[in-house]
Amino acid sequence: MPLSASEPYDLAVIGAGSAGLAGAVAAAELGLSVALLDTAVHTGGQFYRTPAPVMGAVRPEALHHDWSPYADLRRRLARSDVRHLPGHHVWSVTKDVDGEGTGEGAGEGAGPADGPWAVHAVTGADGGGERPVRLRARTVLLATGAYERQLPFPGWTLPGVVGAGGAQAMLKSGLVLPGRRVVVAGSGPLLLAVASSLAAAGARVPAVVEASGYLRYARHPRALVANPHKAAEALVHGAALLWHRVRVRLRSAVTEVHGTDRVEAVTVTRVDRDWRPVRGTGRRIECDALAVGHGLVPQIELATALGCTTRPLPDGTTALALDGLQETSVHGLWAAGETGGVGGAQLARAEGELAGIAAAARVLDRPAHGGRVRELQRRRDRMRAFAGAMAAAHAPGPGWSGWLTDDTDVCRCEEVTAGQVREAIEDLGARDARTVKLLTRAGMGWCQGRMCGPAVACLAARGRAAEPLVERRPFAVPVPLSALAALDDPAMPRPDDQGETPSEPGAAPGGDG
Amino acid sequence: MARTPAELVGAQPGPPFQITFDGRAVTALPGQSVAAALWGAGILAWRTTRGSGRPRGAFCGIGQCYDCLATINGEPNRRACLVPARPGDAITTQEGHGRAALGV
Ligand SMILES: Cc1cc2nc3c(=O)[nH]c(=O)nc-3n(C[C@H](O)[C@H](O)[C@H](O)COP(=O)(O)OP(=O)(O)OC[C@H]3O[C@@H](n4cnc5c(N)ncnc54)[C@H](O)[C@@H]3O)c2cc1C
Ligand code: FES
């Protein structure tokens, strides 16, 4: 069977969060055939994460503000011909070289859209490799969102320490809490959202601990004035926190977690403007869980593997560089939402729609302009300015490493300690994360450096600005060997085939070995 | 004011069912992941690390950190935060790389 060669989709959208949904729906409404792939079973991404329908939640919106735009996108998706492919973990996007030269679709595909692309995925709840899938598309929209940035501190590997966004995600989808008294700590606007939902769902939140001060926002008055909805959002969370009597401690950090097999308490210490802990200011707070995060990191490895140009953000993370219509430096590949820089669900929606319109214009060989495009661009630019101000305000100060002890695990997967990382830097002369990784194995485990990468890069920079970390992972998700083997198989199943291949126990976490 | 997450969203899930964790009965709700069901029972750790044998459980909650690896129905290295709980599932603490049973 000559696989899917003759029928590429006009557009493959990877990620069904705010950005991907908006892009898929916009493109389909302009007449494109669209496939929408996501690892998750439900659409909505990180922000509109909801309990499974079988939970019968009659008020899922109680855990979200701004619910109606999502309800609207869902309705439009249901009415459209978009092929929603849930449970599809995309591990690579490649130029489909075979498809360009041969196959019936090649003529059209190699036209204005300069494709077709091949999108490789594995299926199953956790990508256990139940079935490798490849589909072809003329254009691709990358809307894979972000993951949380973590910085290590003594005790952060104890059970009961969870990501702040992770606690939020488990609450929104599983209706569970990690504990009864949950301290929320780290940096960034997400902390307030997390604290108010944990409190609303019945947890006691003894403190929100923020390493920066919100005063830094005041350095960007124009971005603030232009984004009244953001101020309103902060007010909503602020009011909720007051209502639940949650205390916000600014310029402070959790510098140690106490407990043997699970969290029993944390030490909260004041930090100076560089996030250096101030001696003698530590206070113990009893709690049974800690939700922690230091902002979000764009998830862009599918694009960097294709050589897309990136740009450094003020908070030390790296995003894709995009043109006015959301196209990456690689022709025919668009990106929207957090992949272009963290900025929230509303910005993601505007960018997704813009990218959907732009991809449709390319496929239909028409110019993308008009009132709607200009309106979306205006909204995007306004919200991007605010995102930039926010990133600058919450950029980790170089002094955070002052709270590490030599035996603090930096790499959770490979259990590499701060002492070992320091040795690689100070004694062996490592100057970047890559060298530290080769010397210590930090970042070589299952998560491929997602949890320790930002911290290792900061440490290797020794107080100077860390070199922007460009995500280069061989695969976006660990791929079962069977899926790699099947790459050579011309009868590779398409998403519509129901055939099952046996799952392979030996998964290959890229880079582990 | 809501006392529990389920009250907050007005959840009316189907009947709860049983799974086991290291042989002990745990109640799960339809639609919960294995990790959510374990958290619901107050269980926060279901893996020990390869190096120092320390306990671990869910950390990122969204399939990115691989700290939540569990052995589910005999199959090691499943991400408990992503795998839905099913009636009768047997979850066992995964030790090290989880391949002890295979002798590799
Ligand atoms: C853990 C977490 C919790 C958050 N909680 C909140 C919150 O409570 N409030 C708030 O205002 N903001 C929150 N955010 C920020 C929020 O994610 C963004 O504001 C918004 O969702 C951005 O939309 P997006 O479409 O760019 O990305 P997302 O909504 O993140 O959507 C990306 C989608 O891509 C999918 N995906 C990623 N990689 C792949 C792949 N390789 N193959 C297939 N699919 C893939 C993901 O499953 C996801 O559904 C959270 C972020 C994270 C990481
Ligand atoms: S909790 Fe991080 S992968 Fe499951």
Image: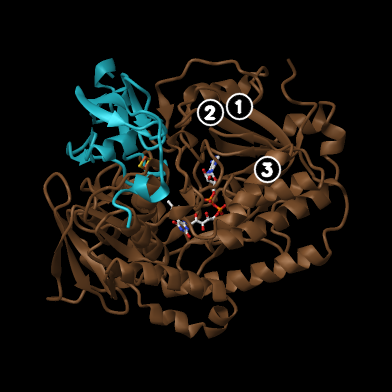
The brown chain is: A
Which chain is indicated by disc 2? A
User: Where residue A249 sits: x, y (%)?
Assistant: 27, 73
If you read the primary sequence from the N terminus, does the residue marked by circle 3 or circle 2 appear first? 3
Crowding at mark 1 (Cα within 10 Å: few <14, some 14-19, many 20+): many
Q: Nearer the viewer, mark 3 or mark 2?
A: 3
Crowding at mark 2 (Cα within 10 Å: few <14, some 14-19, many 20+): many
Q: Residue at x 29, y 59 (%)?
A: A425
Labels 3 and 1 positioned on one and the same chain: yes
User: Where residue A1 sits: x, y (%)?
Assistant: 73, 15
Colour for chain B in the figure: cyan
* Mark 1: amino acid: Val
If you read the primary sequence from the N terminus, does the residue marked by circle 2 or circle 1 appear first? 2
Q: Nearer the viewer, mark 3 or mark 1?
A: 3
Q: Is A481 situated above or below B39? A: above
Name the disc covering residue A133, or none.
1
Name the disc covering residue A123, or none.
2
Q: Residue at x 29, y 42 (%)?
A: A414
Name the disc covering residue A187, or none.
none
Q: Are marks 3 and 1 in contact (CB under 8 Å)?
A: no
Name the disc covering residue A77, or none.
3
Q: Residue at x 30, y 56 (%)?
A: A291
* Mark 2: amino acid: Thr
Q: Secondary structure at mark 3?
A: helix
Q: Is A213 situated above or below A261? A: below
Horizontal side of A480 relative to A340 (left or right) equals left
User: Where residue A384 sits: x, y (%)?
Assistant: 59, 69
The quadrant in which the N terminus of chain B is found is: bottom left
Q: Are marks 2 and 1 in contact (CB under 8 Å)?
A: yes
